[in-house]
Image (cartoon, grey):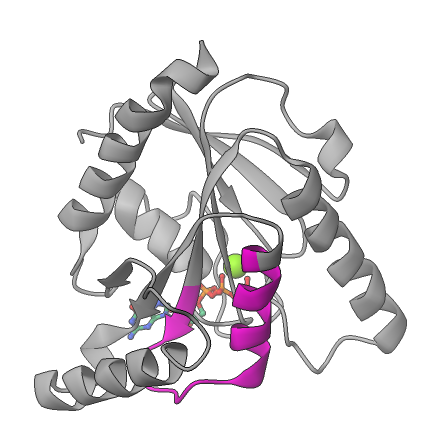
Amino acid sequence: MKIKSADFVMSNSNVMKAPKDRIPEYAFIGRSNVGKSSLINMLMQRKDLAKTSGKPGKTQLINHFKINEEWFLVDLPGYGYAQISKKKRTIFQFFIENYFKEREQLVFTFVLIDSRHDPQKIDLEFMQFLGENQIPFGIVFTKADKLGTSKINNQIANYKKKLLKHWEILPTSFLTSSETGLGREEFLTFIEQTNQDILKDFQ
Ligand code: GTP
Ligand code: MG
């Protein structure tokens, strides 16, 4: 897919106030600092479209971007960021949870996992939550540039082994690097294909 336009639409903490356009939507979620906002910039080939930071907890709201005037891409706050207060964390979780439960346009969710890390409870629990709510998702292994090829393959194989203890079928997965652009074509082709497949549901 060729990216002709990528525009920031709005940020908010209430899914009910999100854009009303009936177009397919794709969400990016994962632990704080995993590289959600960086991946969006890499895919769109725009340096500062989504705000990134070396410090976890940068993205705090639901951010809608409209791509090619045809679909939405959504940058979400990270989960599992220990530094925010307990009260704030509860509100956080509530509006993220609500987003997933209420957003009718959502067609697919990308769960980002740092390819250097072994499977973590919080990510597995989040996938469980998506499964329980019948939300289709795939896994994106990020920051591939930080590991050598054989180490990466090992990590991914281990991750999949762990997933097979919980799931009968493995979710679609991608390997990406926002530094090198690895995985970009594959990712955008997946979205293009999914858009075509669900077109009839949006007419
Ligand atoms: P929150 O908004 O805080 O939840 O974080 P996020 O998941 O949006 O992460 P963000 O994109 O802000 O990136 C966090 C840090 O990781 C930044 O310092 C990025 O430069 C770095 N980073 C993200 N992706 C990559 C990657 O593919 N390779 C490398 N080397 N660094 C990356
Ligand atoms: Mg972010």
- Quadrant occupied by the N terminus: top left
Residue 165 visible in the current orientation: yes
Q: Can you name the residue that lies furthest to the top here?
A: 203
Residue 69 visible in the current orientation: no
* Residue 29, x across and y down, in percent: 51, 58
Q: Can you name the residue that lies furthest to the left here?
A: 149
Is residue 116 on the magenta stretch? Answer: yes
Q: Nearer the viewer, residue 175 or 42?
A: 175
Question: Is 83 on the left-hand or right-hand side of 142?
Answer: right
Q: Residue at x 30, y 34 (%)?
A: 194
The region drawn magenta spans: 112-131
Q: Nearer the viewer, residue 165 or 14?
A: 165
Q: Quadrant of residue 19?
A: top right
Residue 84 sits above or below residue 26 on the image: below
- Quadrant occupied by the C terminus: top left
Question: Is 96 on the left-hand or right-hand side of 104?
Answer: right
Query: Dividing the image into four equal quarters, which quarter contains ligand 1?
Result: bottom left
Residue 69 sits above or below residue 34 on the image: above
Question: Is 92 on the left-hand or right-hand side of 158?
Answer: right
Is residue 113 on the magenta stretch? Answer: yes
Residue 128 sits above or below residue 99 on the image: below
* Residue 49, x across and y down, in percent: 43, 43
Q: Nearer the viewer, residue 130 or 192?
A: 130
Q: Quadrant of residue 155?
A: bottom left
Q: Residue at x 16, y 63 (%)?
A: 180
What is the total number of numbered labels drawn onto the structure image? 0
